[in-house]
Image (cartoon, helix red, strand yellow):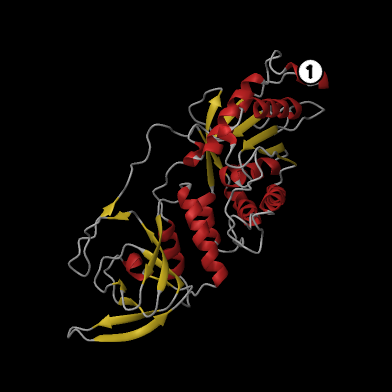
């Protein structure tokens, strides 16, 4: 990761993103891996994330969210080993509405000042289509080219900045995985000696982590929140087992129906309890009814969107709509193995209490490793077909 010769120069890497936490979800493992190898790394956030969600009311208020997220960014980067953090203040949710010239000049100035070998940012899709993501990606692409043009932003010369041409430009890429979080959870639950019962913090943390990781394509589950009034069948005995349930609130009865149609209550379950894993693991129909005793809300993980007319009971034909096929329009050129750095990435995610209030030990190590062990990029400049490192071991 260094330049040959007596005076070794560390590889330098610049990540430019829109909000605090973008850097961790998009390339946290890669940052940790290259930092551990001696790279000099800077992360830039164009906004302070003040328009984001507050998933932990104890962590921030709307008035303090910007300050808190800046501190979360610094803490996350500390976990990743990032040495330099810059948090600009161009207005969360407003990047696409601004005159791009000031921000373009700012990013160009940062490139000329830090003089990175590698620049990473969002691609044209912004990963999830967020206008801020798309805008900062496009501005960074332009700044990447302008930084080497002596005629661009001549005012930089007045403060001693020279043109600089980074060697490589990458866009973050999230392939849509066929793997399912529900299958990983079932594997874990089936190997426990005692039936699992999650705490309120576990329930909240898993719900938010599932929503975020599935939205980014780390898993392909459909995550839904469903409410069931008292007396309603949540699942019926004999149905095909397709979805995994986690009770968020309320209580339900586990009831088996005998050959004579009589119902026999065998258990009761409440907040923090999973159900449905046995049928998924054995690929057999549901062996009991789950009936809401009071108002019950559940997180439901499914392999796809159920068809509208699936029906209920043993005669149901429960089809799964696979949804949109995996995109064939773009393929990652670069896959980075970050399996040794998943703990750092998870610790950085956990630093964002306002966005993803989890503890690093929320889930077993194998589940987190399955989801986060690879990070993908598309190399924009210079073009390449396939690689497994952002840069050779020496410059």
In the picture of the structure, the residue carrying the numbered disc 1 is 157
Residue 27 in the image: above or below residue 59: above
Does residue 342 appear anywhere in the picture?
yes
Quadrant location of the N terminus?
top right
Quadrant hosting residue 171: top right
The residue sitting at 39% across, 31% down in the picture is: 329
Quadrant where the image shows the C terminus: top right
Q: Is residue 74 above or below residue 297?
A: above
Where 189 falls versus 162 (above or below)?
A: below
Left or right: residue 387 compared with residue 307: right
Which one is in front, 139 or 185?
139
- Foreground pick, 177 / 128: 128
Q: Residue placed at 55% from the left, 67% from the top?
A: 202
Picture coordinates of residue 177 (x, y %)? 42, 46
Q: Nearer the viewer, residue 387 or 150?
A: 150
Q: Position of residue 371 (x, y in %)?
A: 50, 52
Q: Is residue 26 left or right of residue 186?
A: right
Rendering quarter of residue 320: bottom left
């Amino acid at each position: 990761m260094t330049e040959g010769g007596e005076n070794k120069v560390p590889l330098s890497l610049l990540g430019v993103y829109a909000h605090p936490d973008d850097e961790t979800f998009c390339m946290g493992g890669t940052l940790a891996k290259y930092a551990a190898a001696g790279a000099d790394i800077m992360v830039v956030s164009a906004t302070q994330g003040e328009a984001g969600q507050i998933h932990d009311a104890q962590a921030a208020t709307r008035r303090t969210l910007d300050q808190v997220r800046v501190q979360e960014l610094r803490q996350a980067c500390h976990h990743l080993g990032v040495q330099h953090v810059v948090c600009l203040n161009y207005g969360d949710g407003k990047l696409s509405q601004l005159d791009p010239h000031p921000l373009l000049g700012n990013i160009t100035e940062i490139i000329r000042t830090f003089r990175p070998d590698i620049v990473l940012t969002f691609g044209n899709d912004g990963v999830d289509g967020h206008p801020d993501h798309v805008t900062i990606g496009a501005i960074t692409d332009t700044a990447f080219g302008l930084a080497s043009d002596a005629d661009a932003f001549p005012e930089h010369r007045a403060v001693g900045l020279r043109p600089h041409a980074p060697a490589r430009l990458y866009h973050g890429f999230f392939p849509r995985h066929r793997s399912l979080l529900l299958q990983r959870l079932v594997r874990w639950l089936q190997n426990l000696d005692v039936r699992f019962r999650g705490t309120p913090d576990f329930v909240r943390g898993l719900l938010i982590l599932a929503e975020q990781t599935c939205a980014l394509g780390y898993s392909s589950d459909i995550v839904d929140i469903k409410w069931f009034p008292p007396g309603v069948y949540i699942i019926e005995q004999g149905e095909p087992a397709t979805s995994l349930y986690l009770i968020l609130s309320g209580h339900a009865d586990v009831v088996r129906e005998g050959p004579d149609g009589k119902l026999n209550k065998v258990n009761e379950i409440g907040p923090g309890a999973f159900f449905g894993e046995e049928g998924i693991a054995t690929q057999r129909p549901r062996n009991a009814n789950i009936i809401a005793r009071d108002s019950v809300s559940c997180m439901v993980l499914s392999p796809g969107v159920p068809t509208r007319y699936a029906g209920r009971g043993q005669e149901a034909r429960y089809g799964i709509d696979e949804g949109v096929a995996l995109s064939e329009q773009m393929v990652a050129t670069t896959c980075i193995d970050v399996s040794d750095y998943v703990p750092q990435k998870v610790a950085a995610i956990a630093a964002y209490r306002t966005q993803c209030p989890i503890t690093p030990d929320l889930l077993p190590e194998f589940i987190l490793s399955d989801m986060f062990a690879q990070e993908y990029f598309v190399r924009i400049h210079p073009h390449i077909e396939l690689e497994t490192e952002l840069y050779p071991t020496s410059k």
